Image (cartoon, coloured by chain):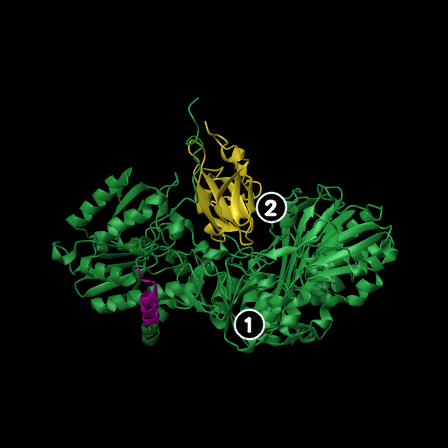
Amino acid sequence: MNAPVLTDVEQEKDSRHGRERLVVIGNGMAGCRAVEEILARDADRYAITIFGAEPRVNYDRIMLSPVLAGDKSFEEIIINDQSWYDDNEIELVSGDAIIAIKRDAKEVVSASGRVTPYDRLLIATGSDPFIIPVPGHKLPGVITFRDLDDVDKMLTAAETGGNAVVIGGGLLGLEAAHGLSLRGMKVTVLHLMPTLMERQLDEAAGFLLRSELERRGQTIITQADTAEIMGDSHVTGVKLKDGTEIDADLVVMAVGIKPSINLAKLAELEVERGIVVDDDMVTSDPAILAVGECVQHRGACYGLVAPLWEMCRALADFMTSAPSGYVGSVTATKLKVSGINLFSAGDFSGGDDTEDIVMRDASRGVYKRVVVKGDRLIGAVLYGDTVDGNWYFDLLKRQEDISDIREALIFGQAFASGGATLDPDSAVAALSLDAEICGCNGVTKGQVVACIDGGANDLDSVRSGCKASASCGSCTGLVESLLSISLGEDYGGARTVTPMCQCTSFTHEDVRRNILEKELKSIPQVMQELHWTTPDGCASCRPALNYYLLCAWPTEHEEDPQSRFVNERMHANIQKDGTYSVIPRMWGGITTSDELRAIADAADKYEARLVKVTGGQRLDIFGIKKEDLPSIWADLNAAGMVSGHAYGKALRTVKTCVGSEWCRFGTQDSTGLGIKAEQMTWGSWMPHKFKIAVSGCPRNCAEASIKDLGIICVDSGYELSVGGNGGIHLRGTDFLCKVETEEAALEYIAAFVQLYREEARYLDRTAPWVERVGMDYIKGRIVEDEPGRKALQERFLFAQSVHQKDPWAERVAGAESHLHKHIAEIRPFAILEPA
Amino acid sequence: MMVEAKWIDIGPVEQLPALGARTLPVQGGQEIAIFRTATGSIHALANKCPHKDGPLSQGMVHDTSVTCPLHNWRISLLTGEALGEDKGCVPVIPVKIDAGRIYIERVAALAGVA
């Protein structure tokens, strides 16, 4: 049975006799390209036989997406038809996979039992789709996206419409989703990571891509961990680990590929992740070579087409006795989804010695980021405008010195190649007169220049004269360049405003205004629309943006826990030794014996090293480990206590004195009002911490005159004052007004807190804010404008209806539990035997 | 018998939130902080700021740096060096990702274990 079975074809091909026998396993892109390259160098050297598992000729696998989307037919993606095999005297054995390599005998055995001898063997088995082994992954209706059969199955499924779930938001998954969506299916994409195509895109570009796909009707769920695929005889849906269920008539698994190495492994060739090859693409057996996605070269495996071409060239050089050596590839990616322009190449993970140059154009939906290291370009991500992708890729591959064109690099090839030394001003000078400067108001360069020629000599006069830069303000830099070019030395220079941080030229006020006007509801959206110059902000703008968004859109904003300071993320105060202190709320400074007992028990149980009475009239339990936080909170919750928010930019305490109930000087129930005020305001996030105090008489035992909001009770009512601070800069409160009833006091408190929430800069206490805007302004908004005050109160109470919940209880119930657990633990001695 | 592999498997990548961190205590040694950046790259540092030992795992991650929660020192996740005006360095522990799992280099992870 082991004797070679010669076919008629082989016996006929006399011209093949006497040549070295080359057998190629794999009729895919790599195998055929390798053969083409060899033939081009020496057409008569080898007698070639190609085995393919698929029953068809060689086609362009990367064009499967356009076939699925209906942009191309199968015939159009055939690379080599039957005549190519015939003309080159190549024997094609399709539909008969090789199942074993006998290295000693130098033979391969196919599934049908056919044995073929070789002198040289080329393995080009490519890769297999990765299947997540969740329950139900073998159900009918669950497919991968790898070959034409898969495309046929998708097309058949799409004929009846229905729901498709694509697992995997990488290149392949998104192309499958796009095709299915165009074919009329309702598509949901599940992606494990937070960012689509996270290996090729940064967060900003991923956000734009996601928004566009959602606009096209796809549902995108990120951080979606598939638990099981549901169905009895056919798939009916997908269930996620968080319990979400999604209906599905078709499930496409496109989570990745793995090199197909089984044959090589069985033949005992050296394999790791892929078949290990040297620079000539030779495996550990000198007679056997390998090429394409199945190989591992210098530790790297590739899943893109460009490296494959480079490997094939090196392989052909070697096989025709002119070895050149393959040195590895730099890869670039483009998404083949019509209407979405996206390009990514090289390394854009950043680093200390790298510099990001970012350009965003919100009106055109463009995001460009190039990463420079020293004088070299090392990475690029482009979204929306990819015309310069190839140019960047070329600079990157050739490691060209870009120091001369650095300033203009981000503007693209046409521009950067235009002149020798370029600064941003000359970039603007080079723009044509009808180039648009201000996208919001549609103002051209010509109009701005005319406005300047007409007498405008600073930013404000340009803004009022022609409206350029008067809306979102993102073109301010361009307008200032034009002022500088047109006026020369007569230009007084850029205005002095303090931007929010180094990531932006916008001020806090600009950002907040834009969040409302443009209805921005997530941090990446703000960064894109407002042209952030860094990919993911910094430790100073991220918490501010998170706050501005939750303040502007209490029910709609996308909370980002990673943009909270540690104390707000952990709902406890970090101490210098890395442990935490825990402060339960004591309403108005009042406690009970039961609460005290629970606190004492908790202090014992969690080995607190200190319990201290705070300045805000409550108890602080020190030295709690982050792992113990959820359980101490559970214990305190059980005794009826909630988080004191002593860690937050939020309402801290309402300090009170005992008031008319006990004190012989007390004029009103200051304790009662304090408790009411605390119950109304607790849990609200603010620009900074916020303290209230209520004193029962002008002796002011509760120290109300150094609080953000102080109330002093008098016989005839309540005196409200604001903007005090007992911190580094001691500041007494300014008198706001006097009211007669508790109800009125609460209304004014709510209105003042909301005005502060809406208008102060993040990390401004009330004192500097009050000084900046002035008491007249605050009285105008709170005291003199009754409808305005009531509207502020209403907005505050609405926000409270959303935010006023005990974060401890949520954590106890299991929210964000990973924050309190170690990822793992290393115990080096646990497994050591005693000597 | 102790298995002397070069790398220690500490679990799947998705246990780490993007722009977040988790801790890895080492018995008898120094606690390690494992970080994940926006682009998905994974880094490990000793969980101690060179300034005043602040737990870096609780800081804010942005780009390839982390800002210490105690006094806002910015530490590079790549080199462990303090950035900007500040001077100091924290040990970097080599990590690698294979098939979606995080591996940490044994020798570096056990550095300082008595």
- Is circle 1 on the same chain as circle 2? yes
A494 vs A529, nearest the viewer: A529
Q: Nearer the viewer, residue A425 or A20?
A: A20
Chain A colour?
A: green
Going by the numbered disc 1, the residue's amino acid type is: Ser
Image coordinates for residue A25, horizontal then vertical, percent: 71, 54
Chain containing mark 1: A
- Asked whether A802 falls inside the magenta stretch, the response is yes
Q: Which residue is at a point 40% across and 58% down the rendered structure image?
A: A687
Disc 1 and disc 2 in contact, CB within 8 angstroms: no
Report which quarter residue A178 is drawn in: bottom right
Where does residue A414 sit, x and y in percent of width and height?
76, 64
Residue A543 location, quadrant: bottom left
Q: Nearer the viewer, residue B14 or A448?
A: B14
Residue under numbered circle 2 = A352
Tell me if A728 is positioned left or right of A168 in this view: left
Within 10 angstroms of label 1, few (less than 14), some, or many (20 or more) residues? some
The residue under the point 49% across, 53% down is: B18
Question: Picture quarter containing residue A56?
Answer: bottom right
Circle 2 SS class: loop
Answer above or below: position of A367 versus A732.
below
The earlier-in-sequence mark between 1 and 2 is 2
Give me the C-alpha separation between circle 1 and circle 2. Answer: 35 Å
Give the letter of the yellow chain: B
Q: Chain of mark 2?
A: A
Q: Give the residue type at disc 2.
A: Asp
Which mark is on residue A471? 1
Residue at (50% x, 47% y) in the render:
B35
A262 is higher (above) or lower (below) than A360: above
Q: How many marks?
A: 2
Q: Which residues are magenta?
A: A792-805
